[in-house]
Image (cartoon, rainbow, N blue to C red):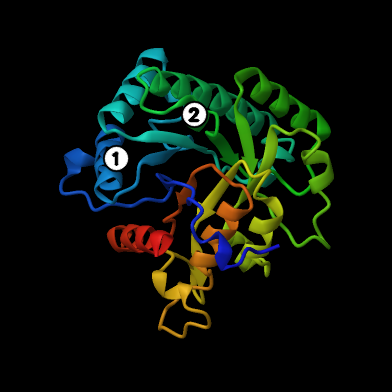
Amino acid sequence: MIPDGSNANLPLPPLALAMLGLELPTPSIGDLDPASKLRAALSFTRAGGVGAVQLNAAEPGFRPRDLDRSARRELAALLRRSNLGLSGLDLFIPPEHFAMPGFQDRAVTAALAAIELLADLRSLVCASGSLNESHAKLAALSLMLPAQTDRVIIDQLAAASEKCSVRIADHHWAPPSTDTSQSPRITHEIIAPGLDPAAILMAGGDPIAQAAKLARTLASARLCDVSAVGRRAVSAANNTPFSTALGSGRLDVHAYAATLSACGYRGPVVIDLRQVNDPHRGLKQAVESWSA
């Protein structure tokens, strides 16, 4: 059931910002190295009023194989100095790679390494008390598994997740009539749904209804929208029913936030600025729309 206005006083889930697809203007060639780009992104996040980040485990320089123990400690220290929490990791490699013989081993290896990386970073970041224990437990690895995933792979990912106490957020979604994958995936509680409103809207679904249905079991939720030309940032203008503002998106952010809150989701909601040309405006709109 989608909540009514009686739930207006419930606290909203906190916001995080995904590093995936975040394109900030760089003033010089020297700022293009991964470490400098991350520092700029963390400053941008704090200045925008967001308290946590979702790192991209597929980004060169921040892939598990790029980060030895010392580099992981340095990354965690940078998050602490920036006064930012860690909401999780993104690993959006093509889902079909988990099913294709030529790519399957590499995809599974990358996912297993990302699980271990998230466990390490979570432990290091939380060591200073910058995130409380209950918040830290909500950090998840976001990925997208194919519609039909080999049970052996599911069991392998689940075993690694359980060992590291890291949840996997599977952002695969398809209309119920065509989705044959839900039953085998949800047999492991540690592999839980991830909610991406833009992906659901583009597939002809209703993200508000999905939020109401899945909120208590979600491992991760995104904050993003679509327009007639593709992904876009959310806007407070969408909180007005039947908005006809030029360029407005399709997600009712107020209803989405209220539904997640009222239906029991307590994890971070990750602002997703993929394909957003003006990240400063996009982040400002997302933060304003969330609290409107």
Image quadrant assignment for residue 212: bottom right
Tag 1 or tag 2, which sits nearer the N-term?
Answer: 1
* Residue 105 spot, x, y in % from top left: 68, 29
Q: Is residue 62 above or below residue 212?
A: above
* Front disc: 2 or 1: 2
Pointer 1 residue: 42
Q: Which residue is label 2 attached to?
A: 136
On the image, the x and y values in percent for residue 25 come to 24, 53
Using the image, determine if residue 261 lies above or below residue 99: below
Quadrant containing the C terminus in the rendered view: bottom left
Q: Residues within 10 Å of mark 2 (few under 14, many from 20)?
A: many
The residue positioned farthest toward the top in the image shown: 69
Q: Does the rendering let one see residue 246?
A: yes
Q: Is residue 191 above or below residue 121?
A: below
Residue sitting at 55 percent across and 67 percent down?
Answer: 5
Which residue is at 57% across, 44% downward? 220
The residue under the point 48% across, 19% down is 120
**Residue 152 versus residue 216 in the image, above or below:** above
Image mark for residue 255? none
Compared across the picture, whether 138 is left or right of 52 comes to: right
Element type where label 1 sits in the image: helix
Looking at the rendered structure, the number of numbered marks drawn on it comes to: 2
User: Which residue is painted at 74% across and 35% down in the image?
Assistant: 101
